[in-house]
Image (spheres, rainbow, N blue to C red):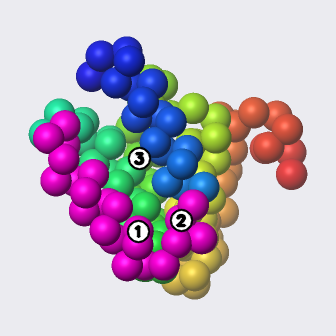
Amino acid sequence: MKYKGLRRWKAMLHIIADFVPCWLPEQLSALLHYIETSSCAKHFSASQRDFIALIKAVAKKDPARMAWYSKKLLEQKDANVLEADHLEYILSAGMLGDVSADNTREADLLWRQYCPLLPAEISQL
C-alpha cells in the first residue's frame, strides 16, 4: 500500500475503533461490509483484514475472537501499521476478550509481553 493509502488506513482505524462502542451492531456491520466489499479491499494486507475481524469481534462482544485476533495482530507487530494507540486498542481488546472468557492468566501474560511496547504514560497505568 502506498504511503498516502497507509495514512488513510491509519485514520480509518482511529475513527472505527473510537466509534465501535457508540454504533449499533447493525450500523457497524453495514460499515464493515462496505469496507470489505470496496474496490480497495483486494489490496488489504493480512493485518488489515485481521484488524477488521477484530473490530467485528469487539462489536459482537465475542471474547474468543477478540483474544484470538488481538494476539494474531500483536504477533505481527508491523511497525508501519501499529502505532501506539492502535497497539493500546489491540492489547486492550485482547485482554478484555481473555478476561471475559475467564482466561485471566492469558490476559496477564498478554499484558506482560506487550506492555513494554506501549508509551510510558500508558504502560504505567
The residue that label 3 is drawn on is 73
Count of picture labels: 3
Q: For label 2, count other residues whose C-alpha is less than 10 Å away and answer few (under 14), some (14-19) or many (20+).
A: some
Q: Residue under label 2, please give it.
A: 20
x and y, in percent, of residue 14 in the image: 55, 44
Q: Residues within 10 Å of mark 1 (few under 14, many from 20)?
A: many
Q: Which quarter of the picture shows residue 78?
A: top left
Q: Are the two marked residues, 3 and 2, in contact with CB atoms closer than 8 angstroms?
A: no
Q: Nearer the viewer, mark 3 or mark 2?
A: 2
Q: Residue at x 64, y 47 (%)?
A: 88
**Contact? badges 1 and 2 (CB < 8 Å):** yes
Q: Which residue is mark 1?
A: 28
Left/right of residue 44 with respect to residue 84 in the rendered view: left
Inspect the image, locate mark 2, and give the three-letter code of the amino acid beneath it: Val
Marks 1/3: CA distance?
21 Å
Could you tell me what secondary structure mostly forms the magenta stretch?
helix
Image depth: mark 1 or mark 3 in front: 1
Q: CA gap, disc 3 to disc 2?
A: 18 Å
Task: Using the image as rendered, state which of residue 88 and residue 113 is in the foreground.
Answer: 88
- Magenta-drawn segment: 19-41
Q: Where residue 65 sits in the image (x, y, percent)? A: 38, 70
Quote the CA–CA distance across marks 1 and 2.
7 Å
Q: Say if the magenta span includes residue 6.
A: no
Left or right for 83, reference 81: right
Q: Is residue 34 visible?
A: yes
Image point 48% across, 78% down: which residue?
24
Task: Give the secondary structure at mark 2.
Answer: loop
